[in-house]
């Protein structure tokens, strides 16, 4: 990539670069990771870009109460201006990423979708993202988003506090299933459960729309095995790796080792996700955590790049 900045081998050689040295050093390591696998870069289906004031509210939440994980600290590693955050992903060699955003109340999704369309237009690596909420008019704005080129949706069952099988959403799910547009859905009960989180409401959605391309965020943690069941039952269900297997997550929601063979078996439907920038550790840790599973380079190549490249036609 032409915008790849090679980090100075010795920071003393270029003192003016000193403030970014550690970021550059991390970028070099991330590039080494995918370079070793022979990939052209990474595809990350779970990154957050949203209007600044919404993002700052999210950061305030992590700062003040944490995501209800027993008071554990959650320092945001990549707290920076929007352009700088996008530049970090570019330096990492993330060929394509998303702008996961989601409403917590009615009347917000259409506005978020307008912002996200604009963000994608000025950010070539961003897969145009949209969102939805059970409310009158949802089918119309989902159709608008799809017709204007949205390539992925985000749904957040815990923050939105809605039943994904809500009747109001039925036409929207139908439309997205028909169009084959994937939906990253945070529907597991981690790190904080909600009234409608867990596998059961999602199973009801899939029974009605078996071809809906749901990408279960965070591997469905902590209900990992229940969501693996759904992936095994429904061939269009995928899982994103966001935060899974990192030391941070393993301490609070460990992935059951007995389920590793099942994760290997659905390896063509597991997608790299990171939660950048809202992660309490460096980006590289997510990659190392995946490598540490020992599922092999073929699995890693598929997860870190190839599966998403096929899904999004990159
Ligand atoms: Zn997220």
Image (cartoon, rainbow, N blue to C red):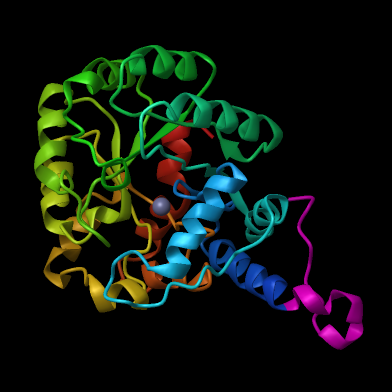
Vertical side of 88 occupied by 310: above or below: above
- Which image quadrant: the C terminus? top right
Nearest the viewer among 162 and 182 is 162
Q: Residue 74 location, x and y as percent?
A: 43, 72
Residue 8, magenta (yes or no)? yes
Vertical side of 14 occupied by 126: above or below: above
Q: Residue 19 location, x and y as percent?
A: 79, 76
Residue 98, magenta (yes or no)? no
- Identify the residue at image location x=52%, y=70%: 284
Visible residue check, residue 309:
yes
Query: Would residue 24 appear left or right of 79 to someone viewing this image?
Result: right
Q: Which residues are magenta?
A: 1-21
Vertical side of 182 occupied by 192: above or below: below
Vertical side of 122 occupied by 238: above or below: below
Determine the image quadrant of residue 152. Answer: top left
Nearest the viewer among 173 and 62 is 62
Q: Residue 292 location, x and y as percent?
A: 36, 75
Q: Residue 180 location, x and y as percent?
A: 35, 23
- Identify the residue at image location x=24%, y=58%: 264
Query: Would residue 125 appear left or right of 282 to someone viewing this image?
Result: right
Nearest the viewer among 88 and 68 is 68
- Identify the residue at image location x=59%, y=65%: 78
- Identify the residue at image location x=31%, y=16%: 136
């Amino acid at each position: 990539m032409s915008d790849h900045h090679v980090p100075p081998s010795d920071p003393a050689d270029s003192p003016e670069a000193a403030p970014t040295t550690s970021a550059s050093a991390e970028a070099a390591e991330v590039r080494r990771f995918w370079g070793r696998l022979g990939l052209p870069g990474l595809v990350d289906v779970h990154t957050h870009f949203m209007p600044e004031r919404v993002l700052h509210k999210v950061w305030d939440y992590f700062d003040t109460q944490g995501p209800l994980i027993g008071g554990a600290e959650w320092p945001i590693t990549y707290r920076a201006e929007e352009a700088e955050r996008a530049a970090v992903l570019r330096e990492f060699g993330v060929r394509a990423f998303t702008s996961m955003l989601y409403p917590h109340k009615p009347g917000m999704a259409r506005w978020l979708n307008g912002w996200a369309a604009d963000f994608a237009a000025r950010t070539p690596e961003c897969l145009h993202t949209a969102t939805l909420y059970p409310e009158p008019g949802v089918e119309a704005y989902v159709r608008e988003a799809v017709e204007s080129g949205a390539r992925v949706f985000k749904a957040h069952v815990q923050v939105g506090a809605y039943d994904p099988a809500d009747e109001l959403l039925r036409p929207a799910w139908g439309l997205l299933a028909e169009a084959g547009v994937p939906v990253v859905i945070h529907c597991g009960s981690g790190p904080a459960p909600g009234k409608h989180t867990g596998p059961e409401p999602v199973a009801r959605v899939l029974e009605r729309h078996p071809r809906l391309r749901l990408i279960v965020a965070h591997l469905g943690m902590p209900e990992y095995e229940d969501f693996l069941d759904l992936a095994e039952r429904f061939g269009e269900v995928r899982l994103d790796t966001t935060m899974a297997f990192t030391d941070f997550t393993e301490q609070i929601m460990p992935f059951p080792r007995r389920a590793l063979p099942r994760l290997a078996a659905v390896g063509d439907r597991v997608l790299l996700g990171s939660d950048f920038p809202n992660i309490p550790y460096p980006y590289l840790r997510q990659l190392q955590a995946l490598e540490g599973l020992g599922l092999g380079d073929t699995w890693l190549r598929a997860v870190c790049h190839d599966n998403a490249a096929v899904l999004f036609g990159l």
